Image (cartoon, rainbow, N blue to C red):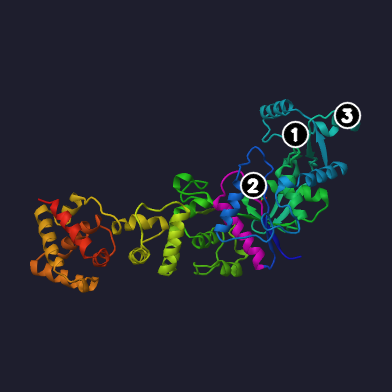
Amino acid sequence: MGVRTRMAPSPTGEYHIGSMRTMLYNYALAKKEGGQFILRIEDTDRERFVEGATERLMDVINAYGLNWDEGPRVGGPHAPYIQSERLETYKEYANQLVESGHAYYCFCSKERLDTLREEQRKAGMPSTKYDKYCLNLPKDKVKENLDAGLSYVIRLNVQADQEISFDDKVLGHITFPSKDVDDQVLLKSDGFPTYHLGVVVDDHLMEVNWVMRGVEWLPSTPKHILLYKAFGWELPTYAHLPLLKEKGDTKKLSKRMGSVAAHEFLLDGYLPEALINFLMFLGWNPGTEKEIYSLDEFVKDFSVERIQKTDLVVFDRDKLAWYNGQYIRMLSAQDLWERLKKWMSEYDQQPEYKMEDTYSIKVQSLVQDRMRVFADFLPLTNYFYIDFDCPVELLVAQSGSESRAKEILETFYNLLKELSVENWHSKFLDELCHRIISEKGYKPKESFMTLRVASTGQTATPPIFDIIELLGQEKTLSRIENAKNLLK
Ligand code: GLU
């Protein structure tokens, strides 16, 4: 059997960008080895279940350009791939462990467990543990309780004297003493399995032989290994991946620093291929200078041996913006415009003004190099589409005095109004305006910045003659005139 990897998200909220990185690595390993990548939904925690989250997480995975060989929506030989549809299976396997003595019924009330925990805490125990009270119930008492319909859970019977060890493909050899492992609940009183039982039973039944997941799951691994052993099943290969953190001290990605959920980055206007490229490097690198990777190239070059052995890797938001800028620049004008329009309509970002295609593609060509995300487009270009209140102070500041600004604008106005339409293109405008300012003795900076503020309302824009070429003669003259009239 070839490599079978999986991602097993729990629909408890919006899909995290870090999970997308973990998914990408699982996807790449399966594809590289000619194996299968499986998606399984672990929705057994009914308290944390969020309505609609399953559908949304599948949509966002697809929107990032990834897909799965087996799982919900596509099916597969081990269907269903949603745990809440497999409850009978877990019950069966939990019972099997009870029969073999690896698990037992526990009827303890919440009150008893709370008291126990409290006592252990007071006694200074580093972590609290179940005291195996129900393990010692006589068989007929258990039967009596079950017949009486008493609420119960099934617990794993952990032997205290074992060493649990395994070779993690990233972290190396790891050993846990079993005395630190609690008699984990496997089946809850509501008939749902816990994560531990569900994940082990399903990974086994779905023939998953590689478990690659965030290092936050490492403490669960000894529990899983005990379960594999109790069932007599072969262990998968484990690889625990570093988690993501913000630059600086914070230990986690933070909403204060920007988006955190995978779909939010799409809404911000990042391209999926740029996001995926950025995610590739969060815990892995090829050992070369190459930074731009398509998904296919990544699949070819990916290797578990090159995964970083640290707990945390920096999620560098500036680097992400850099990647996105690179991908925006790589698109043809037509493609970029189509994608920009799609983004605006999908994420409800359309402006109130109309954007005609041919004109907008020209506008776009002036800002393509400056855009880091799609969301930059509108603030960078709105003066091409709508008039604005000219900021007088800014206008005056360019030459230092109101009368000077007025004089400069008058000069340009008189010059430009005489031009014929055929000559209204940036090269000609550029030469002509340079000629007049040298005749008049104006400095280039004061003149063109004044013209820029009058035409755009801003100081940082693409080249001014490219702008006024696109604005056209009529609009340019009316803006200069308007600005001029604001000055004494
Ligand atoms: N359901 C777990 C999650 O929410 C799966 C963890 C694992 O990969 O074992 O991520």
For the residue marked with disc 1, what is the amino acid?
Tyr
| Disc number lying in front (2 or 1) | 2
Relative vertical location of residue 288 with respect to residue 196 in this rendering, above or below: below
Q: Position of residue 15 (x, y in %)?
A: 57, 49
Give the numbered dot on residue 10: 2
Examine the structure image and report whether residue 27 is included in the region drawn in magenta.
yes
Q: Position of residue 430 (x, y in %)?
A: 20, 70
Q: For this view, does 331 lie left or right of residue 30?
A: left
Q: For this view, does 243 lie left or right of residue 344?
A: right
> If you read the primary sequence from the N terminus, does the residue marked by circle 2 or circle 1 appear first?
2
- Quadrant into which the N terminus falls: bottom right
Asked if disc 2 is less than 8 Å from ligand 1, the answer is yes
Highlighted magenta segment, given as a residue range: 7-32
Q: For this view, does 76 lie left or right of residue 453?
A: right
> If you read the primary sequence from the N terminus, does the residue marked by circle 2 or circle 3 appear first?
2
**For the residue carrying disc 3, how many other residues have a C-alpha within 10 Å: few (<14), some (14-19), or many (20+)?**
few
Which image quadrant for residue 51?
top right
* Nearer to us in this view, 398 or 243: 398
* Nearer to us in this view, 295 or 112: 295
Would you name the residue on which mark 1 appears?
130
